[in-house]
Structures are given as C-alpha cells and as structure tokens.
Image (cartoon, grey):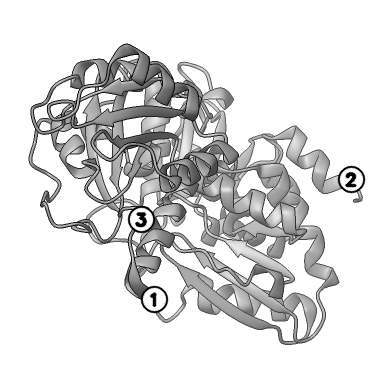
Amino acid sequence: MQRSTLNDTPLASRLHIGIFGRRNAGKSSLINAITNQDIALVSSVAGTTTDPVFKAMELLPIGPVVIIDTAGIDDEGELGELRVKKTYQVLNKTDLAVLIIDGVAGITDYDLEILERIREKNIPVVGVINKCDIRRYTPEEKQTLEKRLGLKLIEVSALKKQGIEELKREIINKAPSSFSERPLIGDLIAPGDIVVLVVPIGKAAPKGRLILPQQQTIRDVLDHGAIAVVTREVEFKETLKNLSKKPRIVVTDSQVFTRVAEDTPPDIPMTSFSILFARYKGDLAQLVEGVKAIKKLKPGDRVLISEACTHHRLEEDIGTVKIPRWLKQMLGFDLQYEWSSGFGFPENLDEFKLVIHCGGCMINTKEMLYRLSLLKQKGIPVVNYGVFIAYATGILERALEPFPEANLVLKTER
C-alpha cells in the first residue's frame, strides 16, 4: 500500500510525538531544529510556551506526525500549575515522548517525575541532553546520567542544530510500529468489491465537504482496491438497483440507520461510520458491553455525553437533543445530563452511571484508548454514538454482523 503523506493524513491518525522538559530546556528550539522551520516561539524568558502547541509535519521514513510542544514541567504559580497540568494531560495522547534534559543544569526531580509518568503509561521515550554547544559531557559523565535515568541520551544543540540527525534516527527507531495498523474497513473488503457509503446531506452536514469519518472511509476503500459508491439516503434504494453486482457492505451515517436498514437486503452486511470508528479508534467490545447498562439506569442517574470536537449545535443536535430524547423514550423517565467537548475529559467520572462518547474522529487512538481504560478502571459503562443509535433503533445486532466478536459480546450476558 502507498505510504500516507502529510496532505492526506488527518491529524488524529498521525503519530503524536510529545516534547517534555523543564522551562528553557530548549523544547521549542528543538522542535524548530527537527522541523527546520521557525514554527515554535523561542525566548530566553522562562515559560514562553504556555499551552500545548500541535504541529503537523512529515518525518521520513515514519511519515506524517504531530509534534506537541508543551509548557515546562517546573512552571510556577497558580497559572503555572494549570500549565503543568495540561502538559501532563498531553501524555494521554502521546505515542512517543521526547524528554529534554537541560545540559547546563543537569537532571532534576522534575525530569525524574515526568519520566516516571511517561513509563507508567508505557510510552516509548527518547532522551535528549540539550545545549552541548555550551556544556559537553565526557563519556563517563554521560554514562552516569544514562544510568540514573535508565535511558539512552542523545547529545544535541538545538540552537546550533548539532546532533539533530542522530536524534531523528532515534525517534524513528523508538516509534511504535502498531499505532496506524488498526483497520478501518480494509480488512472487511477485497479488491474489486463494491462498498456503498450512505451520506445524508442535511443541516448538520458541513457545506461543500464531507465529515472526517466519511472521508477516511472512502480513502481506505480506495486504498484497498475496492469501489466506493457514495449516495444519499434518499437515492440509496435506487443506487442498489442500478449496481451491476451485490455490494460487499453498506456503511451509513448513524442518523439514517433505520431508513438504510429497511432498504438494505438481509444478505448484504450493513454497519455505520461510527461503529467502524469505534473499532478503529477504541475498543468495540467494551462499547457494545456498555449498552447493557442502559436498561439498568434509574430516574435521576447522571449520564455524561462527551464529544471530542467543538461545533455549532443545531436545533436537532445529536448530543444535546436526540440522545436524551431516545433515552427517555426507552426508559420512560428523565436522567441528569452533563456534556463535555474538545480535548478535555471530565475528572468527576465517578458521578456518572453511563458515558456516551462520540466516534472520536478528532482525537488520536492513544487518547481514545486512554479514556476507555479510565472508564473501565472505574467500572463505568461506555457506548459511542454509533453503537447507541443502532441500539436505540433496534438494529444493533445487524450493524454488528461484520464484527462477530463484538456481536458475541452483545448476545452474552455479563
């Protein structure tokens, strides 16, 4: 398969490389040196970087990556504590960490603490000693530092761009090979298969383009040599009639699940973009298991509806209007709701009896798996939009037919 390039790889699908270290250790300067661009603000004033900054680039031979510049882990004061907290939160979406040690100041407790947290999350880490143009270590001194950290260290000068190529090679060597290997739809189809994608064009559809899950699914179909046929739900039935052979699978937007299910012959597998993303970004079995908790909800129970992006909410918004309406229709009583959006995830998770999460197309796999593992650890059931809507409309079992293991979870009692 042709390797992805910077222009065709969505931000959430790229390897996320987090840069960590103390203030003025040279994090921003190192990013400029790696990218060979002045993309990060550099200053001798401590604490110049106040919030995580995400930069998309291509790092050969890995391909498209996102480099994350973070605030110093030794930031001070009330605002400083908030910045440090955001820096630690970046670990939840980091696939590979780069820890920068200030070569002049040496190793501090701050460096040891962030390294411990990186290892607790089983994140591959590359160690860097910066400012070798000012302070050069003897082989014996460097070996002592490496032994203290339990980490190989690459000596660089971000300012003079010394040692950068060696650092890039180490990043390439440490990059996890499995971060982009999760299947979207490619393992369900074969070259020459016809895949019908049902894309409603309503008020919620972005003007002049398709939403990210639809774009990525089309691209994955094409990458695997299959034929993508895209249609609206109103023309779907006619589209099936005009095809020369039976489609291998139908993929629909969750919000027209019922209509598409009615128009899809029983011998043609059918699922949704959101269910594909539940498997691609997270743990489909865990999300299917979560539907069993819905009927156990009681009046007044708290439900978190979480979206990984921010958008303008319309009159019939799925998260704030449709999902609460479906739940009331199913249960016959009111629940209490809380909503979250963007990269943040609430800390008061213990208050909720159920979490309903979006498809997660705007966050990377690392972040989505972190959220799911956090909920699993706390024993809080979770479903995603696609799984929930299929369940609410009575067609979840059919939508899971392409995924036998997840379907078995649905049919098996806890």
Residue placed under numbered mark 3 in the picture? 74
Q: Is there any visible trace of residue 390 in the rendered image?
A: no
Mark 2 lies on a secondary structure that is loop
Q: Nearer the viewer, residue 383 or 118?
A: 118
**Relative to residue 367, is residue 287 drawn left or right?**
right
Residue placed under numbered mark 1 in the picture? 313
For residue 412, the mark is 2
> In the rendering, at what x and y percent does residue 290 appear?
74, 57
Whether 269 is drawn above or below 71: the answer is above
Q: Residues within 10 Å of mark 3 (few under 14, many from 20)?
A: some
**Quarter location, residue 99:** top left
> In the rendering, at what x and y percent does residue 404 appear?
75, 33
Q: Residues within 10 Å of mark 1 (few under 14, many from 20)?
A: few
- Kind of residue sitting beneath label 1: Arg
Q: Nearer the viewer, residue 168 or 7?
A: 168
First in sequence: mark 3 vs mark 1: 3
Mark 1 lies on a secondary structure that is loop
Whole-angstrom CA distance, mark 3 to mark 2, is 49 Å
**Relative to residue 373, is residue 185 drawn left or right?**
left
